[in-house]
Image: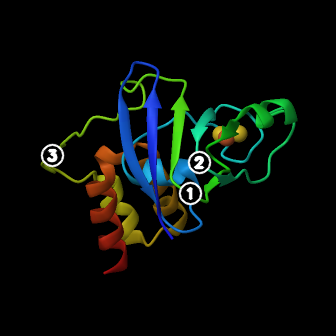
Amino acid sequence: MSFKIALNFEDGVTRFIESNPGETVADAAYRQGINIPLDCRDGACGTCKSFCESGRYDGGSYIEDALSDEEAEEGYCLTCQMKPETDLVLRIDASSEVCKTQVTDFKAVIEDVNPDIQAAKSEADLEKNEALTKQLTDAGEDFQPVLQAFQGGCNS
Ligand code: FES
């Protein structure tokens, strides 16, 4: 069952997302283009700590350093671990601008392909291909078309 989640940011902006069954709030937010604060994604750092204003959820697993029992009882939660059991209202202690909640379009034209990519392809240098794939992946979403073109070329 999917649930609706209201994310209230500290600058007064509210954004609504939907979670898929079994999906964490953080994963749901990222899937819908909202980059709520995260670091470890493993319940260890507390970077994603938020406050649940209403709703029920499974808090997941985490260590005391990330979220104490007292904080959990007060309503604090870790978005990287929590899975909604009802619709939720969460207070996110970050501005909507930092979380890039605005709808954004990117347009790009690929004018050239790096000769290193061609060389790696022609030499079937698997190790180099993996390194280039990692670099393009780490470069972010703007480079996804390049990554897809590269991977398509490697599989052809
Ligand atoms: S991102 Fe580290 S505890 Fe959630």
Q: Nearer the viewer, mark 3 or mark 2?
A: 2
Q: Is label 3 within 8 A of ligand 1 (CB to nearest ligand atom)? A: no
The location of residue 14, given as percent across then percent down, is 37, 33
The residue where tag 2 is placed is: 55
The answer, for residue 30, to whether it is visible in the render is yes
**Considering the image in quadrants, where does the C terminus appear?**
bottom left
Viewer-nearest residue: 54 or 62: 54
The residue where tag 1 is placed is: 86
The location of residue 42, given as percent across then percent down, is 72, 48
Which tag, 3 or 2, sits closer to the chain's start? 2
Q: Residue at x 43, y 22 (%)?
A: 95
Dots 1, 2 in contact, CB < 8 A: yes
Q: Is label 2 within 8 A of ligand 1 (CB to nearest ligand atom)? A: no
For badge 1, the amino acid type reads Thr
Dots 3, 2 in contact, CB < 8 A: no
Per the image, label 2 sits on a secondary structure element best described as loop
Horizontal side, residue 41 vs residue 71: left or right: left
Which tag, 1 or 2, sits closer to the chain's start? 2
The location of residue 47, given as percent across then percent down, is 65, 31
Q: CA distance from mark 1 to mark 3?
A: 40 Å
Q: Which mark is residue 74?
A: none
The answer, for residue 137, to whether it is visible in the render is no
For badge 2, the amino acid type reads Gly
Q: CA distance from mark 1 to mark 2?
A: 6 Å
For badge 3, the amino acid type reads Ala
Residue neighbourhood size for the residue with mark 2, other residues' Cα within 10 Å, grouped as few (<14), some (14–19), many (≥20): few
The residue where tag 3 is placed is: 108
